[in-house]
Image (tube, helix red, strand yellow):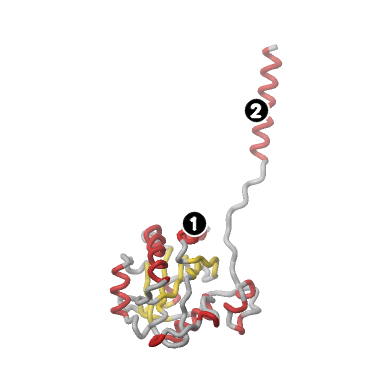
Amino acid sequence: MKRILFLVIFSVIGIVVIYLNNRPAPEKESLPIINPAELNEEMVDPELQQLGLGHTIGNFSFLDQNGKTVTQDEVKGKVFVAEYFFTTCGTICPKMNQQMQRVHAKFKQDNRFRILSFTVDPDTDTVAQLKRYADGHGATAGRWIFLTGKKEELYQLARKSFFVLKPAEAINQGDVGSDFIHTNNFVLVDQKMRIRGYYDGTSAKDVTKLIHDIGLLLAE
């Protein structure tokens, strides 16, 4: 009887071992690569709407909060999050940058990651103004980078690279001008300058997902 019981137990153990060794490996979690053809047409410059593959963030050159020229070379080979904001905003921007502080706190020690905060109001947001704002948000130099420059160049990057401006969002903001970006989107970009996700920067839940997704890209 004991011999039979032993054989049964041994057989069950063998079956379990074979199953564990041969079961399919779980699929690795990955993020989509987002191209213009997959976005709402309202968000995409007409010249790019049919681009199904191969979109990457374009070249740029702006000044950061320390007066240093920053180009696309700063983020090539790195994961980064981009946002558009302005320092005197009293509505969504404070909520967005409160959430961005969570992102910064999580990854500020990782040289493979950057945050780029582009102003939409460069007339007000001078280098000195951005410096005050960055210091007020505990931004680590070289990790969370606030950028200003020519308005037309900032907006062209928003329209043709990050796709964060649509006609309905061009609103009159008095002295800022009639063409004005006011978006709550955070844009996640990978090491190859490809868009991998959009997130509501005013939503703690969305930003928690963003933090998770940044980790996925850093592990790729």
Q: Residue at x 40, y 85 (%)?
A: 176
Residue 39 appears left or right of 73: right
Name the quarter where the N terminus is drawn.
Answer: top right
Q: From the viewer's perspective, is residue 37 above or below residue 13? A: below
Circle 2 crowding by C-alpha within 10 Å: few under 14, some 14–19, many from 20 = few
Q: Which mark is residue 212?
A: 1
Q: Earlier in the sequence, mark 1 or mark 2?
A: 2
Residue 106 x, y percent position in the rendering = 40, 57
Q: Residue at x 68, y 27 (%)?
A: 12
Q: Amino acid at mark 2?
A: Ile
Q: What residue is shown with label 2? A: 13
Regarding residue 160, the answer to whether it shows in the image is no
Q: From the viewer's perspective, is residue 130 above or below residue 111? A: below
Q: SS class of the residue under badge 2?
A: helix
* Separation of residues labelled 1 and 2 (CA atoms): 37 Å
Q: Residue at x 37, y 83 (%)?
A: 122
Residue 26 x, y percent position in the rendering = 62, 48
Q: Are marks 1 and 2 in contact (CB under 8 Å)?
A: no
Q: Residue at x 67, y 36 (%)?
A: 19
Circle 1 crowding by C-alpha within 10 Å: few under 14, some 14–19, many from 20 = few
Residue 148 x, y percent position in the rendering = 38, 80
Q: Quadrant of residue 16?
A: top right
Residue 81 x, y percent position in the rendering = 46, 68
Q: SS class of the residue under badge 1?
A: helix
